[in-house]
Amino acid sequence: MLGLFVFFYACIHLTAYLYLDMQFVVTDIVEDIIEHKYITIGMFAFLTLIPLAITSTKGWIRRLGRRWQKLHRLIYVTAIAGTVHYLWAVKKDTFLPLVYLAIFVVLLGYRLVMWRRRRRQPGGPAAARAPEIAATT
């Protein structure tokens, strides 16, 4: 649900930009995306959210199987892009965007440490699947 709330916020954020800043003038929007790095990376972040939001239902999770989890690892790229978008968009006081970036780096670092720890443990993910593999062969 958190991911869908993020997508909903991003849709509102994008709609406000398109309507209030650009008045839905396509040529101005394209020019702005090309001219400003923070808009470019913000659009990239939004585009990466679309497949994540579409495939967030139980039906898509079932249809994609293990590929669903691989697809949803795209959230790490999206989070980095969104954080950089916020940092680059702020003109003066970058304290808050840097706090968000620091929080994200700490959480991502923790996730990486836990992933590596599980990989090293005897009986880690590969060993847990060994009985399944042996049973199917």
Image: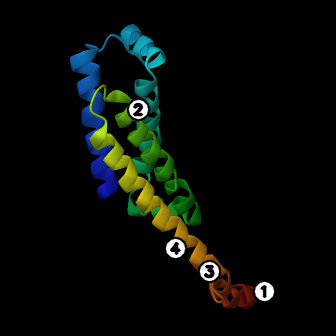
**Mark 1 residue crowding within 10 angstroms, few (<14) / some (14–19) / many (20+):** few
Cα distance in 3D space between marks 3 and 2: 35 Å
Residue 7, relative to residue 71: is it above or below?
above
Q: Which of 125 and 63 is in front in this view?
A: 125
**Mark 2 residue crowding within 10 angstroms, few (<14) / some (14–19) / many (20+):** many
Q: Which of marks 2 and 1 is in front?
A: 2
Q: To which residue does mark 3 refer?
A: 125
Q: Nearer the viewer, residue 33 or 65?
A: 33
Cα distance in 3D space between marks 4 and 1: 31 Å
Dot placed on the residue nearer the N-terminal end, 3 or 1: 3
Looking at the rendered structure, the secondary structure element under dot 1 is: loop
Dot placed on the residue nearer the N-terminal end, 4 or 1: 4
Which numbered disc covers residue 114? 4
Residue at horizontal 40%, vertical 15%? 32
Which numbered disc covers residue 137? 1
Q: What is the three-letter code of the residue carrying label 2?
A: Gly
Which numbered disc covers residue 64? none
Q: What is the three-letter code of the residue carrying label 1?
A: Thr
Spot occupied by residue 133 in the image (x, y as percentages of width and height): 72, 84
Q: To which residue does mark 2 refer?
A: 42
Cα distance in 3D space between marks 4 and 2: 29 Å
**Image quarter (top left, top right, bottom left or bottom right) of the N terminus:** bottom left
Q: Is residue 72 left or right of residue 14?
A: right
